[in-house]
Image (tube, rainbow, N blue to C red):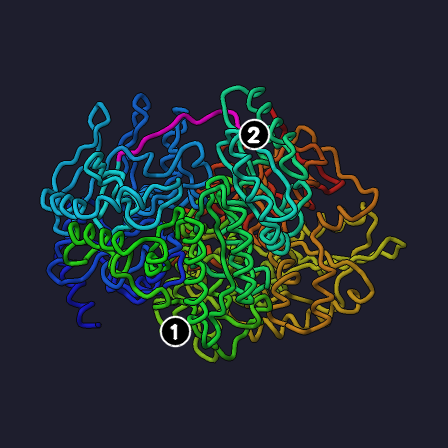
């Protein structure tokens, strides 16, 4: 294999292609969002149709297969292969033209769905199909699978929305499909292929006329009915062929008018079966969407993100989210109310507010990721992902499927496009057991027989891929399978295009990624939510790819490094895939691929809250650094920035000398280099007097509170701590400091010095334990340090009762004030605030309490999404400056530049430092904004 890899790579490079064949890249592209892991020989990122043709030429010469890939969000294993993977998302990702008059657009295959929608939106039009992965899936991938999405009741499948295709056949022939002005299908090129297809069809006409197109979501197999002589519509026939018949290089898509008014009706039912049974009657009301959701999925979300993550729902254990759309508000609301009052559900609610609607749809869109944890608490996997039955039989099917799942001792949380008869589900298949794949095969086979008995389709929108192609005999006759084989041979006689899928399929239980047990010993972190198993933790990543999307519209943070570089290795998913190779024993911790993937991780923890599967890459990065450098020489920044609190205490003893030294031209520049700090960064000055030296507790009868004055606040921003003291006293509390000088160990954690971090945290917990046992709240000032005491303490001190007690007493300033009866904040009406929540505040602590507090003051607040880009030591380290600046440019800098007079609110020391360093602008901590002795001067207007 290494020789073949070298030969193929050499040929591809010789053809002038952008080729990646390193261990890290191959690991990242070995999986998509499916169960499967197949290492490719190489990854090519074509820039043009000519380069696609060149890659196909190399494939023919070497006999190496080609697999086309878009966003890599396939749940059936359609986008992985043993040969060359063509990643269209990197370069061939443009909207080439858009015509509002004809409502069409010409796109490259790697165009992200959301990019097309953004281009169409100013014209009041949109691309109709909208799968839940729309912020990151590509149009080419949607064409490959015949994706549908939640609004297919109104807009149909992808095949209904494609007006023409450009593709290359395996032989390198350019093939163009489309329609003439009267709508008659036309095709140019590919004469040999088309002749072969017509010959095959002539032998199977009866089957093609009777076994296909029986209901709307029959997606499995080839759409052979479109190749009948009386229609021969190659455009529609190629949609859903999963990259096995040609390589799409361009598409003309139809656009539809985007209705300006949308209203959602939420219907509550006693169980998911009742919801499924009601769906056909709901569809009779003419909605654009009818989506089903089981309470088991809602329970997972509540457990992960708390009760506030779910807007109020009607009573029930299952729900239908039903959307109506139109031009007139009264008309649309009237239709919604008629459905709500029709008596189909036990309870109903009409939702007009677009913000609440967005929250509801976000639950549905995150369904695949949320379902990555089964109701049992075990990992849940795709495999039987999107079966569909005629909608009239959905309720029966759901009941029978639940019985089948229970018979195998498994659990599930169904959801899906109930108006179309399509169910999505993830299952806690016992893949960690020796007979795991045997159980998987038996269960999937019985599931295929079940759906076949209902006249259904193994796939309702995601394609068959490696997960279901072997099961097609349970749905189609032998003659239909022979027809598929003939169509495949006519287009691809050498089986170069995505082999193992649809025709001559690979076994469904081959190459299963999470099979087996991969114990990684001597771990530093506890991984309490994964049973102490790092393999289970990193396999939380199911590949749904939300980390490849811009999540700022929903207030998200993940993943700032990917948005800065657009490289798979800098996404949460890419990093998880590399770590999965580590736990398999395929890569050592010290492998360059591991550290290349981890290098630009900002440890922002955005993924811990924003990834629906609950990945915590910051923790995994700390583990990776710990495992690599334990008892070894470390990068010099680990000794300086990674131990900054220690150096800060030393500098705080003679701050004037430390500040003077850093301003001397030679001494300062050499010091920065020795510290591993980028020379373009300025270093914050030490305060003249650290806070701990100046603080004097008062003797009073106020309620006691422990003030956790972290090292950053103490040495660099004592004024923030002083404001915190004044706010606490004004609220009826008397703050006191811990008896010993304490530290949370954050910088040791982020640099992987976890043995030291554990010792530091143990001392800190001991210093705080007595107050915690007495019920005294512990208030943090710096969000990242507060988050360590709330969360990381469980990772580093598992089973420590005092640590758990301390964590339960930790509060942010806003949380404590919100719990304080009678406290009211200052009147800030007329004050414009641009707020940059610290990433750890967003991900671990939650910023809603702060948002509610600010709203109560009357301030006008613009809350920013994303990361500031400094992220502790990350943004000042050599090699990270450009990415740090790019991340700041995503949300923070545009917002503060747009309003130079606004108050910039940033609780994080690193956030305030970034604003000062890049814009020379002051920013405030919440305590300073609330400080009774000062008032901000920025006003609206």
**What kind of secondary structure does the magenta stretch mostly adopt?**
strand
C-alpha span from label 1 to label 2: 54 Å
Graded by Cα atoms within 10 Å as few (under 14), some (14 to 19) or many (20 or more), the crowding at tag 2 reads: many
Mark 1 lies on a secondary structure that is: loop
Which residue is the site of mark 1? 590
Which picture quadrant has residue 157?
top left
Graded by Cα atoms within 10 Å as few (under 14), some (14 to 19) or many (20 or more), the crowding at tag 1 reads: some
Q: Quadrant of the C terminus?
A: top right
Segment colored magenta: 252-262
The residue located at (37%, 59%) in the rendering is 467
Q: Position of residue 223 (x, y in %)?
A: 28, 44
The residue located at (49%, 47%) in the rendering is 917
Label number found at residue 698: none
Q: Is residue 258 rendered magenta in the image?
A: yes
Which picture quadrant has residue 834?
top right
Q: Mark yes or no: residue 687 visible.
A: no
From what the image shows, is residue 470 above or below residue 334? below
From what the image shows, is residue 334 above or below residue 392? above
Q: Position of residue 386 (x, y in %)?
A: 44, 51
Say left or right for 57 vs 410: left
- Residue toward you, 54 or 878: 54
Label number found at residue 263: 2
Looking at this view, name the residue that lies furthest to the right: 701
Q: Position of residue 539 (x, y in %)?
A: 46, 65
Mark 2 lies on a secondary structure that is: strand
Looking at this view, name the residue that lies furthest to the front: 206
- Residue toward you, 927 or 208: 208
- Residue toward you, 472 or 183: 472
From what the image shows, is residue 675 above or below residue 837? below
């Amino acid at each position: 294999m290494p020789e073949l890899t070298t030969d193929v790579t050499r040929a591809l490079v010789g053809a002038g292609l952008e080729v990646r064949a390193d261990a890290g890249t191959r690991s990242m592209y070995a999986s998509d969002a499916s169960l499967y892991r197949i290492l490719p020989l190489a990854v090519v990122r074509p820039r043009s149709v000519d380069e696609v043709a060149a890659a196909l030429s190399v494939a023919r010469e070497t006999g190496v297969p080609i697999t086309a890939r878009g966003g890599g969000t396939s749940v059936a294993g359609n986008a992985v292969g043993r040969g060359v993977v063509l990643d269209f998302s990197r370069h061939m990702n443009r909207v080439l033209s858009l015509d509002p008059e004809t409502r069409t657009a010409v796109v490259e295959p790697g165009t992200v769905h959301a990019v097309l929608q953004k281009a169409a939106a100013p014209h009041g039009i949109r691309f109709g199909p909208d799968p839940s992965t729309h912020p990151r899936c590509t149009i080419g991938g949607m064409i490959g699978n015949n994706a549908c999405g939640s609004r297919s009741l109104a807009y149909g499948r992808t095949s209904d929305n494609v007006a023409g295709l450009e593709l290359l056949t395996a032989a390198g022939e350019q093939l163009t499909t489309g329609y003439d002005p009267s709508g008659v299908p036309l095709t140019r090129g590919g004469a040999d292929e088309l002749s072969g297809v017509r010959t095959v069809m002539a032998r199977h006409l009866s089957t093609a006329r009777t076994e296909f197109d029986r209901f709307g979501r029959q997606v499995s197999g080839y759409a052979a009915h479109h190749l009948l002589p009386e229609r021969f519509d190659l455009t529609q026939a190629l949609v859903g062929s999963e990259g096995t018949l040609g390589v799409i290089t361009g598409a003309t898509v139809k656009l539809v008018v985007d209705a300006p008014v949308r209203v959602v009706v939420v219907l509550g039912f006693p169980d998911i079966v009742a919801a499924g049974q009601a769906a056909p009657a709901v569809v009779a009301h003419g909605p654009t969407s009818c989506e089903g959701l089981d309470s088991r999925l809602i329970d997972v979300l509540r457990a992960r993100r708390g009760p506030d993550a779910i807007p109020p729902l009607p009573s029930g254990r299952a729900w239908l989210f039903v959307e109506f759309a139109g031009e007139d508000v009264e008309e649309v609301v009237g239709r919604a109310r008629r459905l709500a009052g029709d008596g189909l559900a036990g309870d109903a609610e009409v939702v007009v507010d677009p913000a609440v609607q967005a929250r509801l749809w976000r639950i549905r869109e995150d369904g695949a990721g949320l379902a990555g944890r089964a109701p049992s608490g075990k990992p849940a996997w795709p495999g039987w992902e999107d079966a569909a039955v005629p909608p009239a039989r959905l309720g029966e099917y759901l009941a029978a499927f639940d019985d089948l799942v229970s018979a195998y001792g498994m659990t599930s949380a169904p959801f899906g496009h109930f108006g179309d008869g399509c169910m999505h589900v993830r299952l806690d298949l016992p893949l960690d057991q020796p007979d795991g794949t045997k159980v998987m095969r038996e269960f999937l086979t019985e599931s295929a027989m079940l759906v076949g008995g209902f006249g259904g389709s193994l796939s309702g929108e995601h394609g068959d891929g490696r997960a279901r192609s072997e099961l097609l005999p349970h749905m189609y006759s032998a003659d239909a399978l022979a027809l598929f084989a003939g169509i495949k041979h006519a287009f691809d006689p050498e089986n170069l295009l995505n082999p193992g899928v649809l025709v001559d399929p690979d076994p469904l239980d081959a190459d299963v990624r999470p099979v087996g047990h991969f114990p990684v010993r001597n771990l530093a972190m506890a991984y309490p939510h994964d049973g102490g198993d790092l393999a289970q933790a990193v396999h939380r990543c199911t590949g749904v790819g939300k980390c490849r999307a811009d999540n700022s519209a929903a207030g998200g943070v993940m993943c700032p490094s990917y948005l800065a570089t657009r490289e798979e290795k800098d996404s949460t998913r890419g990093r998880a895939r590399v770590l999965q190779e580590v736990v398999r024993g395929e890569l050592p911790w010290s492998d360059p691929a591991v550290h290349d993937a981890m290098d630009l991780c900002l440890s922002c923890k955005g993924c811990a809250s924003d990834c629906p599967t609950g990945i915590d890459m910051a923790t995994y990065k700390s583990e990776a650094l710990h495992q690599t450098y334990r008892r070894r020489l470390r990068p010099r920044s680990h000794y300086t920035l990674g131990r900054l609190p220690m150096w800060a205490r030393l500098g705080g003893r003679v701050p004037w000398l430390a500040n003077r030294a850093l301003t001397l031209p030679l001494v300062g520049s050499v010091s920065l280099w020795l510290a591993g700090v980028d020379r373009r960064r300025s270093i914050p000055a030490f305060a003249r007097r650290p806070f701990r030296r100046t603080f004097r507790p008062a003797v009073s009868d106020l309620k006691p509170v422990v003030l956790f004055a972290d090292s950053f606040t103490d040495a660099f921003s004592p004024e923030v701590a002083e404001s915190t003291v004044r706010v606490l006293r004004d609220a009826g509390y008397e703050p006191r400091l811990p008896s010993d000088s304490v530290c949370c160990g954050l910088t040791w954690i982020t640099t992987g010095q976890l043995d030291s971090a554990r010792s530091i945290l143990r001392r800190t917990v001991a210093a705080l334990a007595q107050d915690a046992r007495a019920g005294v709240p512990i208030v943090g000032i710096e969000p990242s340090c507060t988050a360590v005491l709330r969360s990381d303490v469980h990772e580093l001190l598992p089973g420590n009762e005092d640590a758990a007690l301390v964590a339960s007493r930790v509060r942010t300033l806003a949380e404590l004030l919100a719990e304080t009866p009678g406290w009211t904040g200052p009147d800030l009406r007329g004050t414009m605030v641009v707020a940059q929540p610290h990433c750890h505040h967003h991900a671990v602590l939650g910023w809603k309490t702060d948002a509610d507090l600010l709203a109560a003051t009357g301030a006008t607040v613009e809350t920013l999404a994303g990361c500031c880009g400094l992220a502790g030591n990350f943004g000042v380290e050599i090699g990270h400056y450009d990415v740090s600046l790019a991340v700041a440019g995503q949300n923070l800098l545009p917002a503060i530049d747009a309003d130079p007079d606004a108050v910039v609110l940033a609780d994080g020391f690193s956030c305030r430092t970034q604003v000062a360093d890049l814009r020379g602008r002051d920013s405030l901590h919440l305590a300073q904004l609330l400080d009774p002795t000062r008032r901000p001067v920025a006003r609206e207007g």
